[in-house]
Amino acid sequence: MQQHFDEGALVAVMTTQPLDRALDYRAPEGGCLTGAFVEVPLGPRKVVGVVWGAGEGGYDPSKVRSVIRVLDAVPMRDEMREFLVRAADYTLTPLPAMLRLATRAPGLGDPPSMRKVYRPGDRHPDRMTEPRQRVLDTLAEYGGLSFTLKELAEQAGVSTGVIKGLVTQGAVAEEDSPRDTPYPRLDPERPGMTLADDQATAAASLRERLATGRYGTTLLRGVTGSGKTEVYLEAVAKCLAQGRQALVLLPEIALTSEFLTRVQARFGAMPAEWHSGVTATERRRCWKMVGEGGAQLVVGARSALFLPYRDLGLVIVDEEHDTSYKQEDGVLYNARDMAVLRASICGAQVILASATPSLESWANVEAGKYQKLELTSRFGDAVMPEMRAIDMRSEDLPGAQWVSPTLREAVQQRIDRGEQALLFLNRRGYAPITLCRACGHQIGCDQCDARMVEHRFQKRLVCHQCGETKPIPTVCPNCEAEDRLAPVGPGVERLAEETTALFPDARVAVLSSDLFGSARAMKAQIEEIAQGGADIIIGTQLVAKGHNFPLLTLVGVIDADLGLQGSDLRAAERTFQLMRQVAGRAGRSEKPGLALLQTFQPEHPVIRAILAGDEDGFWQAEAAERKAAGVPPYGRMAGIVLSSTDVQEVFDLGTAMARQDDPLRRIGAQVFGPAPAPIARIRGRHRVRLLVKADKAAPLQSALAAWVGQFKLAGQLRLSVDIDPQSFF
């Protein structure tokens, strides 16, 4: 129950500032409720906070300042505050940092008012200039979304006068619009697609679970192209019919366009969107309407979990195995796990959908924590692609080429038949290493201990750790030899160059996240390819995520061994998932598909499991190995990364932490390290890593908090704790 505090009463306000506790204030005129969003004075500034409960008192009451005002926003619900507290406890994140995730609404608390918005007009300007073209391109790129004058000017990189001129010409429409309006109502009674027998059975089961009104998690596992989306949209329909809200999390912004089209076809209107590709105005509207009940369905990125839902009844995590659900900077959390936590608090159902589930979800099904539904056949006439290995040891291939003769012949056959082929290489850029052939020097980043990647399209070297760029040099920075620098190894740009030479008459399209200026531009390219706008697609893991290319019948994996290297405990799992997902892009309509994996290790257990399609056998073997090693999901792990501009300072702290590990030893945990992190310097900061390993049932968080609490960080020292780390960089 939300408590009301009368004017002048002491209230505890949790702000988003980096403080270790809530601060006491006096309730403003008219009082306030627990959970109210408020503006409070903090030193000379005004900051946003949430009324967390009654104030503590115990000091001179004359020094307590008053809340400035209560913001025009629905108060935070008790269940949301419980979610933030439990998420903070689990991830060992300070509560103010967790609260920041829940208050990311631009203009939160601005009063309701009318405003001018700008959309595409219905006329052409009398003359076209480059700034005018940028405005029109921006409006087209965002699919007709409304902009404020300031947003449109910033996005297009023009002055507001350019936009006003286009309004005068009728090329841009200026409209009065309420600041925040409810989204169009979705109709759950509209008929969906006709489902196959196993789909209909799965959909009925999900509807039954939603009817209980209680928490539960279901793993919806189905081969690529089996219609998982249509099945879980039936669960969304049931949720909406109950008057509750639904959330669909997608791993990649580029997937939203196709998915939104399917939602509109199923329910007759577009849902709310929440991700970095929508304007600040639309994000503000989404945040407000979710809290007021004016948004029935939200489609978004992982941060959509922290929206203020009024009555959340269903959370769907599509491609639940995808590593992009793990936030790797700032607050370190896994959206899949947080979705389960949030649903358990508010009595919602969770659907984890994937063709290749994570071992964590597989283990939870085996342990009886999650239920499982399986879709075993592809939708309609489609069948699973045939999978074969190309043994690169027996292929006659020059040293600087990567497309084998066998794969080349298969691609040519597809082109001759008017079909599409996909060449997959999970490396962005042109070449991962630039090497001096005179002295052997490899060009690295000045700020990081990482090699710089050549991006020939941009004519620059790029560090994939910190984003630092510099022109491609002609002189070796080490020995000053001229014209002796050579690219080593392939990236997608270099593969595109080779492919264009091999197939000069083919239309080649490259899909890599760093080649697009915006999410909308990427979506447009994907749509064009799906409609037959390319013969050969070259892509990174971006193409593995749920895209449907009806004409695609061949997938060629250039380096199937790439993910098997390194010491990551999830290397085998990720390689298996990625290869199966990529192969699943082929043959999704009536034409049969073929997947060819170029490998130097055809006898490797992971490669054999991929080719055999023996998912259960693979998971059982992988589970047995992890169990024997006592690592996740059969043990607990935490990664601690220490960083500083002073390398000695950071190693001294790491050594002290390893020695003073009593709180961890008391729960039977082990500390490994300190050791330099695999990338030992990023953005000029030296990085040292420790790993903590404990039994599954050990109270790891409390022990970690006690251990870390022994040390005070001074100066440049920083410490981050990653519970259940997904990567080990």
Image (cartoon, rainbow, N blue to C red):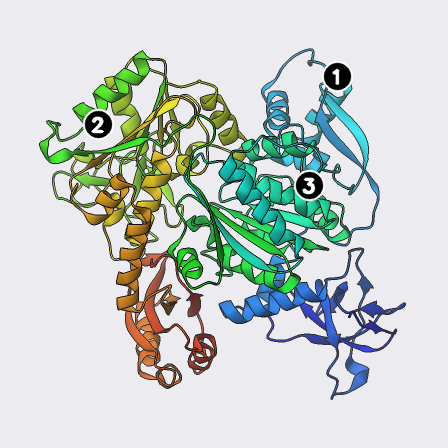
Q: Residue at x 78, y 57 (%)?
A: 74
The vertical placement of 109 against 251, above or below, is below
Horizontal placement of 444 versus 163: left or right? Answer: left
* Image coords of residue 190 (percent x, y): 70, 33
Three-letter amino acid code of the residue under disc 1? Gln
> Which label belongs to residue 282?
3
Looking at marks 3 and 2 on the same chain, the residue that comes earlier in the sequence is marked by: 3
Single out the mark in the foreground, 3 or 2. Answer: 2
Horizontal placement of 610 versus 354: left or right? Answer: left
Looking at marks 3 and 1 on the same chain, the residue that comes earlier in the sequence is marked by: 1
In the rendered image, which residue does mark 1 sit on?
Answer: 169
The vertical placement of 116 against 374, above or below, is above
Q: Residue at x 34, y 72 (%)?
A: 693
Q: Would residue 283 be seen by someone viewing this image from the given angle? A: no
Quadrant housing residue 158: top right
Quadrant occupied by the N terminus: bottom right
* Image coords of residue 307 (percent x, y): 65, 54
- How dense is the environment of label 1, judged by Cα within 10 Å: few (below 14), some, or many (20 and up)? some
Single out the mark in the foreground, 3 or 1. Answer: 3
Q: CA distance from mark 3 to mark 2?
A: 45 Å
Name the foreground residue: 583 vs 640: 583
Q: Residue at x 56, y 35 (%)?
A: 259
Name the foreground residue: 470 vs 671: 671
> Which label belongs to residue 451?
none
In the rendered image, which residue does mark 2 sit on?
Answer: 403
Are discs 3 and 2 less than 8 Å apart at CB? no
Q: CA distance from mark 2 to mark 1?
A: 53 Å
* Image coords of residue 534 (percent x, y): 40, 19
Three-letter amino acid code of the residue under disc 2? Val
Looking at marks 2 and 1 on the same chain, the residue that comes earlier in the sequence is marked by: 1
Q: CA distance from mark 3 to mark 1?
A: 26 Å
Quadrant occupied by the C terminus: bottom left
